[in-house]
Image (cartoon, helix red, strand yellow):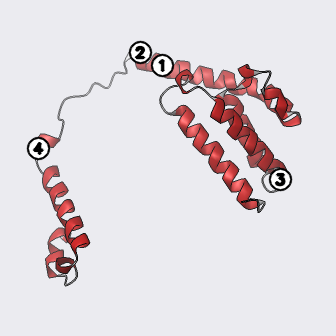
Amino acid sequence: DLLEEAEEDTHVPVCDTCTGTLQSYRDLSSALHDNSVWDERELSETAKPETTNFLRAFADRTRAEDAAASAIVPKLIANPALIDPHPEWRTAGVVRGLLAIVDDKNFTEPKVAAEIAALAVQVADSLEAGQYPFDTVTKLRGKAWRTHAHMLYYVGSY
């Protein structure tokens, strides 16, 4: 057992950090052997209608936003200031569309890709989290910021 092999190690007994870490692993291992930590209830294989409906509605909304974004994104790239008079363009679909363009242009036109990534961040940061389920907005913002940072690094503007 790996947890017991540490007793033979000369470092672990004299290192407080390693000793504490080993004890944490032992405690966790012990807890996992206790049946009270396992939920043994039977789970239904049948999907709940509300879950299915929620997922379908989310998928439908995503498809609709992405379809609408295909017409909006070229306009925004041509004139980023258009985002201000069009708050209805502030959607996850537009962010995804902008990030897709960044992926297309990152090697051929990196400065343009960096500008588009900045626009994606602007739109992502303006999304209302309550309009989307769970952590959709947080993940999209993270992806936009990561892409923007990568493009700034790529063009040497950091």
Q: How crowded is mark 2: few (under 14 residues within 10 Å), some or many (20 or more)?
A: few
Instruction: Tell me, yes or no, whether the two marked residues, 2 and 1, touch with CB atoms within 8 Å.
Output: yes
Instruction: Tell me, yes or no, whether the two marked residues, 3 and 4, touch with CB atoms within 8 Å.
Output: no
Q: How crowded is mark 3: few (under 14 residues within 10 Å), some or many (20 or more)?
A: some
Q: What residue type is labelled 3?
A: Lys
**19 vs 99: above or below:** below
Of the residues tagged 3 and 4, which is closer to the observer? 3
Q: Where is residue 9 in the image (x, y as percent from the top left)?
A: 19, 82
The CA span between labels 1 and 4 is 34 Å
Q: Where is residue 154 in the image (x, y as percent from the top left)?
A: 74, 60
Q: How crowded is mark 1: few (under 14 residues within 10 Å), some or many (20 or more)?
A: few
Q: Position of residue 26 (x, y in %)?
A: 16, 61
Disc 2 marks which residue? Answer: 50
Secondary structure of residue under mark 2 = helix
Ranked by sequence position, the earlier of labels 3 and 4 is 4
The numbered dot on residue 111 is: 3
Ranked by sequence position, the earlier of labels 3 and 2 is 2
Q: Which amino acid does label 4 sit on?
A: Asn
